[in-house]
């Protein structure tokens, strides 16, 4: 099934600069190696407001602009490494952790990219309450793809559906919380090495975040034809308030077009 991604054109939507590699590094590499066409669109600048000076590993960022600049150039290095040219990489630039406040803006920007590139399919992160930007981008992509009658797929990043007590021990990586997928890519030893090398290029993330991830597989599925915020998953964040984020997302979904919504 995954080989259909080798034909036509795929637009991958990522909330932050590293989510594309967490969820779909191997798929992107295989598409590129098989002369498929893939574009990567980053929704946020990867840099929240009000946290500076901010230390990530051994790096100290003095301001938001510096952090955003670093994350952008890290992503370019990673994607160039697997064969994507700069013109295949887009940055919407919305402030990190504010997508839920910019849903219609995000939708409009995604629609513009869809209309420009005319992809055969859209690939977006799943909404599993791991991060407000993930859920928000999935919602905006859901509406944009429905409006343009585009095939929408999801990739798994992480969720807090494990059973341990420590929040980080509860994380599950590259697995959908409900365990349902259409195909999984099992990485070869060479692909695992390449993915680890790609993670190391995200120097601002590798120490505190990416070091927790595993590399054995990547999971994908067609998105449901209805949108819902899962209720049986513990949110992986405390700020902004998860209930507020859920309410804003569902109000947005319910206000857009005549869609059947499952809540």
Image (spheres, rainbow, N blue to C red):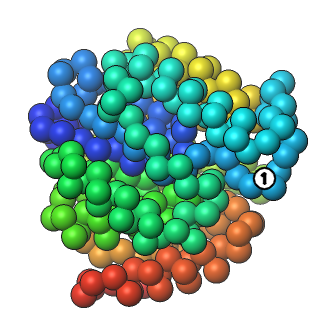
Give 231 or 49, whichever is nearer the viewer. Answer: 49
Is residue 165 found left or right of 150 in the rendered image?
A: right
Is residue 10 found left or right of 210 in the rendered image?
A: left
Residue drawn at (44%, 67%) of the image: 105
Give 100 or 26, whichever is nearer the viewer. Answer: 100
**Can you give x and y, in whole percent of width and height, for residue 252 in the image?**
44, 81
Give 236 or 57, whichever is nearer the viewer. Answer: 57
**Can you give x and y, in whole percent of width and height, for residue 170 in the image?**
67, 52
Name which quarter of the figure residue 101 lies in.
Answer: bottom right
Neighbourhood count class around disc 1 (C-alpha, 10 Å): few under 14, some 14–19, many 20 upward: few
Residue drawn at (74%, 66%) of the image: 239
Residue 231 in view (yes/no):
yes
**Can you give x and y, in whole percent of width and height, for residue 34 in the image?**
19, 21
Is residue 189 found left or right of 120 in the rendered image?
A: right
Residue drawn at (70%, 52%) of the image: 48
Is residue 235 found left or right of 178 in the rendered image?
A: right
User: Considering only vertical position in the picture, is 26 above or below 252?
Assistant: above
Residue pointed to by mark 1: 166
Which quarter of the figure is the N terminus placed in? Answer: top left
């Amino acid at each position: 099934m995954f080989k259909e991604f080798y034909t036509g054109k795929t637009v991958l939507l990522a909330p932050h600069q590293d989510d594309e590699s967490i969820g779909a590094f191997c798929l992107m590499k295989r598409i590129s190696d098989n002369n498929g066409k893939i574009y990567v669109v980053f929704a946020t600048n990867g840099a929240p407001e009000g946290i500076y000076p901010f230390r990530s590993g051994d790096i100290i960022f003095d301001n938001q602009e510096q952090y955003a600049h670093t994350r952008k150039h890290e992503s370019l290095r990673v994607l160039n490494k697997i064969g994507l040219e700069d013109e295949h990489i887009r940055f919407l630039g919305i402030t990190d952790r504010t997508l839920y406040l910019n849903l219609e803006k995000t939708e409009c920007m995604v629609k513009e990219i869809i209309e420009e590139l005319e992809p055969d399919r859209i690939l977006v992160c799943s909404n599993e309450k791991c991060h407000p930007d993930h859920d928000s981008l999935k919602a905006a992509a859901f509406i944009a793809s429905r409006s343009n009658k585009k095939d929408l797929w999801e990739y798994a990043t992480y969720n807090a559906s494990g059973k341990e007590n420590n929040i980080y021990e509860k994380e599950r990586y590259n697995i959908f919380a409900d365990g349902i997928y259409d195909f999984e890519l099992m990485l070869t030893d060479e692909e695992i090495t390449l993915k680890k090398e790609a993670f190391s290029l995200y120097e601002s993330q590798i120490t505190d975040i990416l070091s927790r991830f595993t590399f054995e597989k990547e999971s994908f599925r067609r998105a449901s034809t209805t949108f819902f915020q899962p209720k049986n998953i513990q949110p992986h964040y405390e700020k902004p308030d998860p209930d507020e984020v859920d309410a804003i997302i569902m109000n947005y979904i319910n206000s857009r077009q005549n869609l059947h919504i499952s809540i």
